Image (cartoon, rainbow, N blue to C red):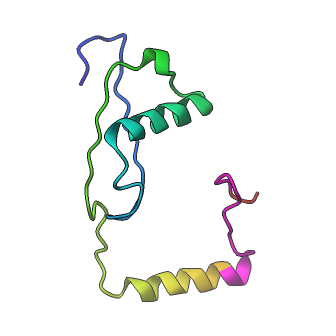
Amino acid sequence: MVADIKRTTLSVEYFCSEGDALWHTDEIDLINRTLLELEKIGIAYRKHYINGFVMRWASAYPIYSLDYRAHVAVIKRYLDRFFEPFHIRPGGTFPV
């Protein structure tokens, strides 16, 4: 995708719902947010950033089973039975 072998392309996904605040965030603000997050975790640095763009896809991950809720319920019951319920801690980390 990139003609210069000293450069690379990086794709980042944000999961949101069509119509929510993240969905309506300005493209420049999303790119700045992404650069900040990538810098925080040490993957990429703003000083190396060349160009970016935002693509929004509604329903990018469709559900293929009409009775998916029943299948998810089975998984939830299993996890609740054998594991402490999972909760996302402030900052987005999972319990270890």
Position of the C terminus, as image quadrant, is: bottom right
The residue located at (26%, 19%) in the rendering is 2
Name which quarter of the figure residue 66 lies in.
bottom left
Q: Seen in the image, is 70 located left or right of residue 85?
A: left
Q: Nearer the viewer, residue 19 or 56?
A: 19
Closer to the camera in the image, 91 or 12:
91
Quarter of the view holding residue 24: bottom left
Residue 81 is left or right of residue 76, and the answer is right
- Residue 93, above or below 41: below
Q: Residue at x 50, y 25 (%)?
A: 44
Q: Nearer the viewer, residue 94 or 14?
A: 14
Res 34 visible: yes
User: Which residue range is magenta in the image?
Assistant: 80-93
Q: Residue at x 39, y 63 (%)?
A: 20
Residue 68 on image: x %, y %: 38, 83
Relative to residue 73, is residue 4 depicted above or below?
above
